[in-house]
């Protein structure tokens, strides 16, 4: 009798297997993104929810807690579920604001029932981390070298294209282990956008996007996955976010920008890239600052955005949200440095101010 | 095929009482409620299964229509150009799981036999406990361990050794950097080992003592008693244990993703990176905002479901066939 119970267990296991695969296909927003119901003693609490990009999440969470200290009646709940999820949730209006590393595309905006506004919040950068024995921080990487490495045409670390700008570096005659992000991510979008700008061949063969078909190499899941593979594999190179690389002590390179200058990734060089393009920002602020002009600009940089509806249904919530965003692009910027997020340049803040002043609730200006 | 065992005799003694009750028309209300409730539970699984299948099919309609069978046999997965072929992922899932099974089953059965038949009593409990503990480790921990311990060890020790000794086989050629199909299969094997071992041990322990005693009394050695009397008796239970392990290997996402190299390519070498169906879903679903891409991922989920089902059926058929062979009961 006991023996015959085993096939039943197997059936259970089959069921359990299905539950797993059910996860990714369900359409409903995850229950965790529901608004927190106001507790009776704090009846006047304004609860705002947002969801989206994981990259700025540490900064947003810091902002939310700092803002709550000054404004006890505003409670903001940010879920870092990924940019794709953020876009989906704001489009379906299940959250008050969405967040995305890359601006929404035209066809994505068209799916929203009303006009969405993009607000740049902070600037991130993507760095090339590597693990080459005897090669310290700051290996100089030309655009050609990066494209060649990721296309698979440059296979060895002592390739002339890598060696040329690095006289004196002890580059080994070993294979390059190319590493990329296997999960869809804004980081990949920014990096492939840079490669597309640096090389027509890349643009034609591979293209740009959150998930692309890399010609060579292997993938790691998340910044931590890429960093783990790079750290444990001599000869590896991979791209990760600047903040992540700094905080985990990875060795990363200096990259040649559009002006032909080799620029070290830093909060200053990243802000410089944003400042260089500030006057060319489109009216809807959906700006890409990859490969920005200017000698000091770090080329693999990008804004990260919060998306809100221009005309909001609830005036109380709308006002609280507008005030929070206003605070974030002013006082909030000072909190970024400690977490390795580059502040928005003054010219960009001016443009954001105008945008925020245009936010309405049922036709009434909020600020 | 079953011959009467001590259990059946026991059953024969127990059964008539219930039968008599039923014949007398006595129906206990509590029994009836219990029956309905348990039936609901059982059919709940069927309903959930049907619901999930329907949802997955409806989600994947765009790619079902657009690519048809090409989705299953296609090898190009390019979200930028919206071309999707899932064969590399199907290949990765099947190969990594079967390889894991091949590595884990002999060891797991050995553990089970040792723990239930051969080990001194004082060691059985602590050792069994440790095996079960292994099953409780979260897969992300296995994954991290895989990245920082297993992968470097594979790169520096195992893979060079395989290259030196079996390097003439295409299976063990190419650059070996520690990540890839072989490492993924190994970590999966370690993960499914406790599942298979502990269930097999319970199955063996549940076998009636008369089997062993009878065989030993007939002059069989320890080995012969286990192989000829015990194992055939518990065969279907052992297959159940293996299928449970296979289920875990097929559906495992995190640990495999962290060491397999996540590259949607079919390669003859086990050193090369690969990708599994579960890993591509976990990797790409959160950031996929394009409808075709989402549908493609849903269809991968549907296919994973199908592959799991097929492998389970195959295992069942295998047992059934072995059981029907003349004298088959004597084999394992």
Image (cartoon, coloured by chain):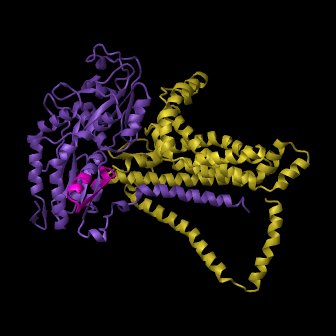
Chain colours: A purple, B yellow
Asked whether B195 or A161 is in front, the reply is B195
Please report the residue visible at 79 percent of the width from the left and 77 percent of the height from the top. B17
Work out whether A208 lies above or below A36.
above
Residue A82 is covered by the magenta coloring: yes
Asked whether B62 or A66 is in front, the reply is A66
A263 on left or right of B269: left
Work out whether B288 lies above or below A162.
below
| Viewer can see residue B246 | yes
Asked whether A301 or A42 is in front, the reply is A42
Work out which residue is located at the far right of the displayed protein and give it. Answer: B218
Say which quarter of the image contains residue A311. bottom left
Asked whether B140 or B312 is in front, the reply is B140
Residue A24 percent across, percent down from the top left: 41, 55
Which quadrant is the N terminus of chain B positioned in? bottom right
Residue A3 percent across, percent down from the top left: 72, 58
A93 on left or right of B308: left
Residue A299 percent across, percent down from the top left: 21, 33
């Amino acid at each position: 009798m006991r023996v015959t119970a085993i096939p039943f267990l197997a059936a259970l296991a089959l069921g359990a297997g299905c539950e797993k695969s059910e996860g990714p296909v369900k359409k409903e927003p995850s229950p965790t993104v529901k608004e927190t119901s106001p507790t009776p003693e704090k009846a006047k609490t304004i609860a705002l929810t947002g969801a989206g990009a994981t990259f700025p999440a540490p900064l947003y969470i810091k902002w939310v807690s700092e803002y709550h200290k000054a404004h006890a009646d505003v409670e903001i709940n940010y879920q870092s579920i990924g940019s794709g999820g953020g876009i989906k949730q704001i489009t379906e209006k299940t959250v008050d604001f969405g967040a995305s590393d890359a601006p929404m595309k035209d066809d994505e905006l068209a799916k929203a029932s009303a006009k969405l506004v993009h607000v740049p919040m902070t600037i991130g950068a993507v760095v090339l981390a590597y693990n080459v024995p005897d090669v310290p921080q700051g290996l100089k990487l030309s655009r050609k070298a990066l494209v060649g490495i990721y296309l698979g045409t440059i296979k060895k670390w002592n390739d002339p294209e890598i060696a040329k700008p690095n006289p004196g570096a002890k580059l080994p005659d070993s294979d390059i282990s190319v590493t990329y992000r296997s999960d869809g991510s804004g980081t990949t979008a920014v990096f492939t956008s840079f490669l597309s700008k640096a090389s027509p061949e890349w643009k034609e063969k591979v293209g740009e996007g959150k998930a692309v078909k890399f010609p060579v190499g292997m993938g790691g899941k998340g910044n931590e996955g890429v960093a783990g593979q790079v750290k444990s594999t001599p000869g590896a190179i991979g791209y990760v976010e600047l903040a992540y690389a700094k905080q985990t002590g990875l060795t990363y390179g200096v990259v040649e920008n559009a002006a032909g200058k080799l620029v070290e990734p830093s909060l200053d060089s990243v802000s410089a890239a944003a400042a260089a393009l500030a006057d060319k920002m489109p009216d809807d602020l959906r700006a890409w600052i990859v490969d920005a002009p200017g000698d000091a600009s770090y080329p693999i940089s990008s804004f990260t955005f919060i998306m809100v509806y221009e005309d909001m249904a609830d005036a109380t919530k709308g006002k609280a949200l507008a005030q929070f965003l206003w605070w974030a692009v002013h006082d909030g910027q000072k909190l970024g440095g400690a977490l390795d997020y580059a502040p928005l340049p003054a010219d960009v803040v001016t443009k954001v101010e105008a945008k925020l002043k245009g936010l309405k609730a049922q036709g009434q200006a909020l600020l | 095929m079953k011959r009467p065992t001590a259990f059946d005799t026991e059953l024969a003694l127990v059964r008539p009482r219930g039968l008599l009750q039923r014949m007398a028309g006595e129906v206990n209300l509590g029994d009836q409620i219990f029956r309905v409730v348990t039936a609901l539970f059982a059919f709940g699984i069927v309903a959930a299964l049907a619901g999930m299948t329907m949802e997955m099919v409806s989600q994947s309609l765009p790619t079902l229509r657009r690519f048809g069978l090409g989705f299953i046999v296609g090898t190009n997965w390019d979200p930028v150009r919206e071309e999707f072929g899932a064969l590399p992922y199907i290949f990765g899932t099947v190969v990594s799981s079967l390889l894991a099974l091949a590595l884990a089953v002999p060891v797991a059965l050995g553990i089970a036999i040792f723990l239930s038949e051969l080990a001194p009593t004082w060691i059985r409990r602590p050792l069994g406990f440790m095996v079960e503990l292994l099953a409780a480790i979260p897969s992300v921990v296995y994954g991290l361990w895989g990245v920082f311990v297993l992968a470097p060890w594979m790169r520096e020790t195992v893979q060079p050794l395989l290259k030196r000794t079996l390097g003439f086989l295409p299976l063990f050629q190419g650059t070996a950097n520690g990540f890839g199909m072989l490492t993924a299969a190994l970590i999966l094997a370690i993960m499914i080992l406790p599942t298979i071992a502990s269930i097999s041990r319970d199955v063996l322990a549940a076998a009636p003592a008369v089997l062993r005693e009878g065989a030993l009394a007939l002059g069989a050695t320890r080995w012969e008693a286990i192989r000829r009397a015990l194992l055939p008796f518990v065969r279907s239970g052992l297959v159940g244990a293996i299928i449970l392990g296979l289920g875990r290997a097929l559906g495992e996402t995190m640990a495999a993703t962290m060491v397999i190299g996540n590259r949607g390519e079919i390669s003859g070498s086990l050193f090369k990176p690969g990708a599994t169906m579960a890993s591509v879903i976990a990797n790409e679903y959160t950031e996929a905002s394009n409808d075709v891409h989402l549908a493609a991922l849903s269809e991968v989920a549907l296919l994973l479901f199908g592959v799991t089902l097929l492998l389970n059926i195959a295992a069942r058929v295998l047992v059934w066939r072995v059981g029907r062979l003349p004298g088959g009961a004597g084999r394992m």
